[in-house]
Amino acid sequence: MWSFVLRRLISSIPVLILVSLMTFGLIWLVPGDPASVFLDASATPEQVANLRRELGLDQPLWTQMLSWYERVLSGDLGESILLNRSVAAAILERLPITLSLAAIALVLAVIFGILLGSLAAVNHGGWGDQSIMTVALLGLSIPDFWLGLVLIVVFAVQLGWLPSGGFVAITEDFGGWAMSMALPAFTLTITQIGFIARMTRSSMLDVLRQDYVRTADAKGLGHGFVVMRHALPNAMMPILTVTGVIAGGLLGGAVVVEQVFALPGVGRLIIGAILSRDFPVIQGGLLMLAVIYLLVNLIVDMLYAVIDPRVRLA
Amino acid sequence: MPEIPTDAIEGLAPQRARLAAFLKRLIANRSVALGGGLVLFVIALALLAPWVTPYNPLESSFRERLLPPSAAHLFGTDHFGRDVLTRVIYGGRLSLEIGFLVVLATGVFGTLIGGCAGYFRSLDNPAMRLMDAWMSFPAILLAIAVSATLGSSVTNVVIALSLATIPHTARIVRASVLVVREMEYVEAARALGARDTRILFVHVLLNSTAPLIVRLTYVFAIAILAEAVLSFIGVGPPPPAPSFGNIIANGRDFMVEAPWVTIFPGVAIFVVVLGLNLLGDGLRDVLDPRMRI
């Protein structure tokens, strides 16, 4: 098991290096000079030169790269041009909001996705199957930010049950926190649940046709027990894979949903930085989210090994 | 009348019959029929826009600001008094155009990267690690960052969205190339002395198109959804030309007094994306019999 973990960790090093190179390289996509793009046309040449020096853009490329790696490896993501503070601190302060939003949506999507997908597989071809799959497909086709806007009008403006946006820290008031997270988490869950429900259904249908399921049925076990105890664990691998993939979709979705519900998370920070060309924040934020995504998929791979001994023994 | 050699007909007939059988199976699939119908309907509306609607999508009329849906304005009017239905139809033009260009770019680059990675063993590992790294940025955030960095234009939106969809597509192409590469007809072509480029493009890639077609149908749907997000954030195609996304973004400030400005373009996105997803599901069932349940 440990050698599997070690091998998996080592294999993620080149990917990490490439990820950091790509975030570093983003600034080179800017047509012209990034420093003069950030400052507007009224900036004097001295101001531009100062900012260039501050960002290290006056150095040769390889020096810039070396100093970027030197800083990043020591946990320093630089200073925000706009906020005038450390990028790492700004991100860490907002990260819990984004992560909790994505995590709540992930847990809900996994629980209800597996439940609905299994129900559909057990009722294969029946009206239950068809209606569940229709709902899953509808969820996949809704634009997330638009759903958020509609929910705000219905539940916040018309009914007045929930706040239309803003954030209450969980440490201050649990009820307020739950209310402020309800609509964003629901929005995110609806758009992601379909992936898991569909994968669960097709994976379960494969497993339910296996001989050992027929044997378990034949020896008189209740069908519900057979589905939960014999079929579902064997259908878990593809479901886990999809869960790893949608983790990326959830982080991206959380960024957009934060924008709709005015949640002060990393997403709003990065989008604000993108719109004002605050490059250190853009680079630091993208790097952070990419590392989180890689970590989630590392955990998913570990879970493969926990669920299926063939993986860890291979 | 010149005589047609019978062996030529014999050579053609099975192929034609196969195509006919395939098309029959395609249309018989409920998802393909429904999804394809929806998509064709929307494309037809977009193409025929000037004949479908009597209004101009850019012409404002201050006397008709924020009118609710009525017989004259089926979807109501926006804060400039512009007909929302007209803007949605013209917006569909731009959104579909962007989606189509993204499909084209993703298809070309996804095929090139995935094909080379799958076919040339020495390229496989580096190319796939690059795709892994590329895919670890949330796609929508990557698109927002690239579009904002390059500046607002239709071309840049297409570049940004393609960059977000290429890596996954390359992986799908690579997976099917890995299978086809080992087929006997590829070995036969190699034995006949065909060059690598010919084997790759003529024999391998042409025989691994099924998963690519399915993927590109979903890419079309993803591009429509993502364009809307880009416009909503403010880094989409530049105004005043309407797109699905920027109609919603403009309507957002009037959501309470005039919800129709926001709701109808969202429903339009939903219908197009639903159609594309249904089409993709159906194509997958027909093209890839292993996936059929």
Image (cartoon, coloured by chain):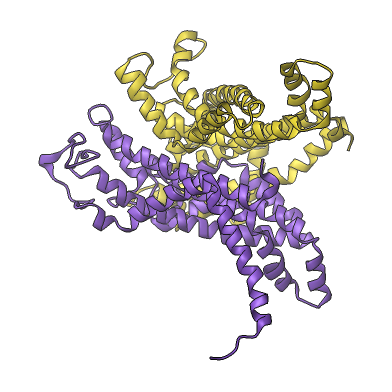
Chain colours: A yellow, B purple
Screen quadrant of the C terminus of chain B? top right
A314 relative to A290 in the view: left or right: right
Return the residue nearer the eye: B216 or A224. A224
Residue A56, visible in the rendered structure: no
Return the residue nearer the eye: A259 or B15. B15
Counting from the top left corner in percent of width and height, residue B129 is at 71, 49
Counting from the top left corner in percent of width and height, residue A245 is at 63, 37
Return the residue nearer the eye: B81 or B288. B288
Task: Identify the residue at the far left of this view.
Answer: B63
Task: Identify the residue at the far right of this view.
Answer: A313
Residue B108 sits above or below residue A196 on the image? below
Counting from the top left corner in percent of width and height, residue B28 is at 54, 50
A129 relative to B268 in the view: left or right: right
Return the residue nearer the eye: B119 or A86. B119
| Residue displayed at 30% across by 58% down | B48
Residue A64 sits above or below residue B195 on the image? above
Residue B108, visible in the rendered structure: yes
Task: Count the marks.
Answer: 0
Task: Identify the residue at the far bottom of this view.
Answer: B1
B192 relative to B150 in the view: left or right: right
| Residue displayed at 33% across by 24% down | A153
A218 relative to B273 in the view: left or right: right
Q: Quadrant of residue A292?
A: top right
Counting from the top left corner in percent of width and height, residue B268 is at 37, 42
